[in-house]
Amino acid sequence: MQPLKYLTGYPPHVQARVRELLAEGRLGAVLADRYGERHAVRNDGQLYAYVQALKERYMRKAVPLGKVLYDGKLQVVKHALGTHTAISRVQGGKLKASREIRIASVFRDAPAEFLKMIVVHELAHLKQAEHDKAFYQLCTHMAPDYHQLEFDLRLYLTQLDAAKAAGPAPPPPPA
């Protein structure tokens, strides 16, 4: 029995149900029914505008963002769905700080709710560095269903891994 790497902290009965859905080939269909539509945020410029809109709505006083982009180098398997960084540079006699948010490029084709969950998570890190109670309160302020979205995102990643392990789909039969 192969471990479900994205669901290791969940109880055995939850993992058993996910394994059952995977064995029946229904996990993708369940997620597609719940989150049918992909988002329209296709490039870095659109992603920046999307993140700025959420930031303006919920975190007006937070530090400004210098860069927001999809990053093909982020490895989901290393638990990095997105990153936030603060970069300090010396310019003349002053120290300039810039904040960046990078989202793993695998989420360019994800459902809209999953992109929002990842962006909310990274925006919350602008105010709260640690994953503590205040951090999750901020996340649920911006996305009230944050915890359900996080679980479903883990299911989505599990489904992607299962599809990758199964290999490419066979070609359709000739007509």
Image (cartoon, rainbow, N blue to C red):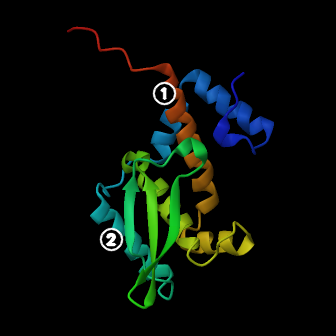
Q: Residue at x 36, y 14 (%)?
A: 170
Q: Residue at x 52, y 66 (%)?
A: 84
Locate the C terminus by quadrant: top left
Question: Is 106 above or below relative to 53?
Answer: above
What number is the disc on residue 49? 2
- Residue 98 percent across, percent down from the top left: 44, 77
| Image side of residue 5 versus residue 113, left or right | right
Compared with 30, 170 (above or below) is above
Q: Are marks 1 and 2 in contact (CB under 8 Å)?
A: no
Location of residue 94 in the rendering, given as x and y in whole percent from the top left corner: 44, 90
Q: Quadrant for residue 154, please give it.
A: top right
In the picture provided, is 53 more to the left or to the right than 160? left
Q: CA distance from mark 1 to mark 2?
A: 32 Å
Relative side of 27 to 60, left or right: right
> Picture coordinates of residue 60 (x, y %)?
47, 86
Q: Amino acid at mark 2?
A: Ala
Pointer 1: what residue? Answer: 163
List x then y, in percent, for residue 142: 54, 72
Q: Secondary structure at mark 2?
A: helix
What residue is drawn where x is 40% and y is 49%? 105
Q: Amino acid at mark 1?
A: Ala
Q: Which image quadrant for residue 171? A: top left
Q: Residue at x 42, y 91 (%)?
A: 93
Q: Is residue 148 above or below residue 46?
A: above
Please determine whether, in this image, residue 42 is positioned above or below residue 28. Answer: below
